[in-house]
Amino acid sequence: MSNILESILTNLLQPDNAFIQQATAQLKEAVKDPLIIPALCDVIRSAQDSQIRQFAAVLLRRRLSKRWKVMPVEQQESVKPLLLEAIQREPEHKVRHALAQLCAVVLRNEKMERWPQFIQFVLQASHSNIPEQRQVGLLALRCALDLNAEIFHPYFPDLIKLFKQTLCDLQNGLLLFYTVQSLTSIVPEFVGNETNQLRPLVPKLVTAIKQLIQINEIQACEAMEVFDELMESEVSVIVHYLAEVIHFCLEIAVNKSLSDDLRVKALYCIRFLIKLKSKSILKQKLLPQILNAVFPIMCAEPPPGQLDPEDQEDEDELLEDQAEVQIPKHYAVQVIDILALHLPPEKLFSQLTPLMEPCLLSKNPYERKAGLMCLAVLSEGCADHIRNKHLQSMLQLVCQAISDNSHVVRNAALYALGQFSEHLQPDISSYADSVLPLLLEYLSRVDPSHTSHLTKAYFALENFVENLGSKIEPYLPTLMERILGCMSSSSSPKLKELSISALGAIASGAEELLRPYFSPVMEVLKVHLMHTGEDGRPVQLQCLETLAVLVYSLGKESFLPLAEDCCLLGLNLCDRIDDPSMRSCAYHLFGAISEVMEDNISHHLEKMTTMMLLSLKSREGIVLHYNENHSFMLFDDEADDEDAVIQEDEDDEDPDVEGFSVENAYVDEKEEACSSLGVIALNASVRKAAYEALGKFARSMNLVCQKNPSEPNTAALLLLLDLLIPAYLHGAVHDKEREVVMTILDSLNNLLKDVKAPCVRGPEQLDKMCAVIKAVLQSKTACQDPEGEDEDDKQQAELDAMLLEYAGDGIPLITAAVGGATFAPYFAGFLPLLLSKMKSSCSPAEKSFGGGIMAESLVSLGEAVVQFVPQLLPALISGTQDKDDEVRSNCVFGLGVLAEHGGAAMHKHYPKLLSILSSIISCEKNGRALDNVCGAVSRMVLSHPEGVPLEQVFPVLLRSLPLREDFEENPTVFKCISFLYEKDPSQVVKHINDIARIFGHVLGTKEIQPDTEEALVHILRNMAQHFPQELQNTLASLPAEVSSKFRPALGLA
């Protein structure tokens, strides 16, 4: 049969369709013959044509992967030695590779116990004196490890010993390549102390890949993935050789003679190492070397006659594959970005400024571009530092560059302005008078055909306006005239798309101020939403996305009459158009509409949630990438085999699949499905969204319990919490992505805020939750580079500080959930950490954090604070003298709460506290701090009125009212006034003019809650009854618009 089979395979390789079709039919019949496996073995062993041998090996692998378990044992035992013999004597590399993959499939089925000869063969061949035989041994090993590395675990010490030898065989390129690939496969399988075996290999890997670069750059680029795997799985292995690995990657990155792919790979490794080990980077003084290497890469000019991809005038000129190309310059900017995110700003700026400033002043446009790109990416990670010290000068540079002669520089300036607008809020909004006219003037003179420039200009405009809030009002007529004009009359689809996107940003900023434009906006959107042609799809998608933003911004008043139509629109578009981007936009709309319709959306929920769950489960958009062997497979010969056996415990990996990718649109669809499911549950880049959505589900279940209390509902909530809380706590400690951990902590905080006690059931849960928060505060979680901690260096990156804030916010929330008495012992454990943030050497952000968390915690600790007065009082008093407004404000608030709950332990300190508060109120310029002084004095009066000289204090308090910014203190302040009025009305009526002025300011406003307004009305009506003349005289002296507010309160309306 082997001769017939060889003839069939030969015909399949003929460049003649007739031959191929006939041979295909013959092969389909041949594979049904019980002798097909021995026949394929004979072809592998005896065929003269290497392509035929390769084809036979691939066919046999396909056959055995599903039929090995049903083969007779005798046949199995005859195949195994034949394969080892065949691969050993095979001269052609492609055939060897196919045979190695065949051996791997057999080994996966047999396991090592039933085929010990395989590992013996590998070790023997790998130690051969013949270079090609060493290659064969490592090739067989690499393919087997690709399919199942775990079964080699008992042999890891032998393999490490082997790798130490083969990595030194520097003249044998393929051997080096297979060794590195094999090592990459086994790294994730090492656990605990086993990882120490890997450490000595790191210098050898560096040397081997250096040599491989000289032999084969493509293989060297692939071999660099071993560092990715080490960083992902066992970064501690690399830390001991951090400087060596960084220097190696920098050498590659700066070498212009190497391929872009290889240089990008090196920069990616540097970026990853900074992300994981930023403190070690600083400790080993590697920052200057990194900056000095990447800056020239950022400044590099493209080849003569070409532009960088992002500087093309027309985005449509870029081919899809060109748009995805990553060049070293892009990754060099990403290195600066990751440095900004993970290093203390002071450390980074001191090293970066001498390199950045000359670029910004250079005559070379690409150097100016590099300087601006640097400013842009600094704005996220170093936002506080820039806002406090550099915003005006940096913004001035960027605005000047928008008028630069070079469009390359203008593009970079627009990108920088967009980044500033996104990350430097709210401070940058105060520059609206200079920024917005500049942007609008630029947009008016850009050629609509230059879509790349338009995109960047609109990016800057969107980011700037969406955070303006009420400050947008003077510019709204001009903005809307331009936007509506472009939406309705422009002939450029791209300009329409950008204008509609900008409308969403304007809506986010303007909110209710946009209502006068609602009708014309909806008319224009309707035209594009009803479009049925493929050519208008991008504009249609943007309209749907913007419609969701408008719903969120304008709310029920505008959209309740249209809510049902919006639901049907989204559902019909999803039914009619099979497009992941369309579904993503529709899901966003469903989430928004659910907040408007609330329970009335229930009749659409089944269809909506079914669609979203299908999106989450879908494998659409997953693209498999095959190796060269796949081209031999003209059909899947096993598709209809009923007796094929596949092991259930196996992944059934296909050795022909080299990898896979997921199209971005499908990832976005899944993320939006997660997010919108969570929003819908509350009202009726995917891990973050999942954690967030799960929290929203739990909070929505809590709402169900509140509205419909029952044992089954409560049991369902507790079951969900039992699954979710441990997942949150594990993720917070072990997830390596800081942004994910921040999402986890924020979601946990929201749960604690809404659900409270059920989140912390029992002392064990409380222990674990507090341990996690403490681990974050002590920088001992996986995303915080705990091994790089330097005791002498307490500066930290701003996003590291944000992570601590998310953790710290949990302390007062847990206190409120379990009660002060229960939490007091845990607060004692947190207190030294919080007090350490209040030292004079700490940054304003750290002191604000420490004082704020302590103050908020005191509110819920209640009477349990008494035991902490000796530690807390000095720290809070010291904080009231700080230069930073927020630190002073937080500490003044904390003093007030301490006085409120500290009982007799605080009474003796009243004179000192009143003196401190008096000195603050006499010279304080910050509105929030003044408001907190009023709150603190009110708490002192309510807690211990005998300790306050009211004749002197009460008039000063009234003169400091109404509150300016911190309206959360209004209930306390007006409770104090009510208390004093009930205690001694005449004492309050003496100051009736101030009382009327204050009441007149807050009545009928959102500054006070309904219950507070009721208390004020009660006081006024009591005054009208008992002090009518005094009240009448006072009201008569007030301006008409103020006195009119009192008429409804007094029942005169």
Image (tube, grey):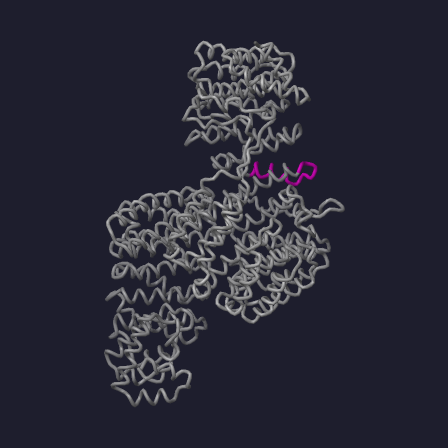
Question: Where is residue 175 drawn, in percent x and y?
Answer: 59, 22
Say which of 591 and 205 sits in front.
Answer: 591
The residue sitting at 55% across, 37% down in the picture is 661
Magenta: main secondary structure: helix
Q: Is residue 705 left or right of residue 997?
A: left
Looking at the image, which is closer to me, 213 or 1030?
Answer: 1030
Quadrant of the image containing the N terminus: top right
Residue 246 part of the magenta-drawn span: yes
- The boundaries of the magenta stretch are 243-259
Residue 241 picture location, percent across and down: 53, 35
Position of residue 555 measured from the top left corner of the image (x, y, whole percent): 45, 63
Q: Residue 831, how many percent across, how many down?
A: 34, 55
Q: Is residue 652 visible?
A: yes
Q: Is residue 827 visible?
A: no
Q: Is residue 50 left or right of residue 832?
A: right
Q: Nearer the viewer, residue 484 or 840?
A: 484
Q: Is residue 97 above or below residue 689?
A: above
Q: Residue furthest right?
A: 305
Within the magenta stretch, is there residue 842?
no
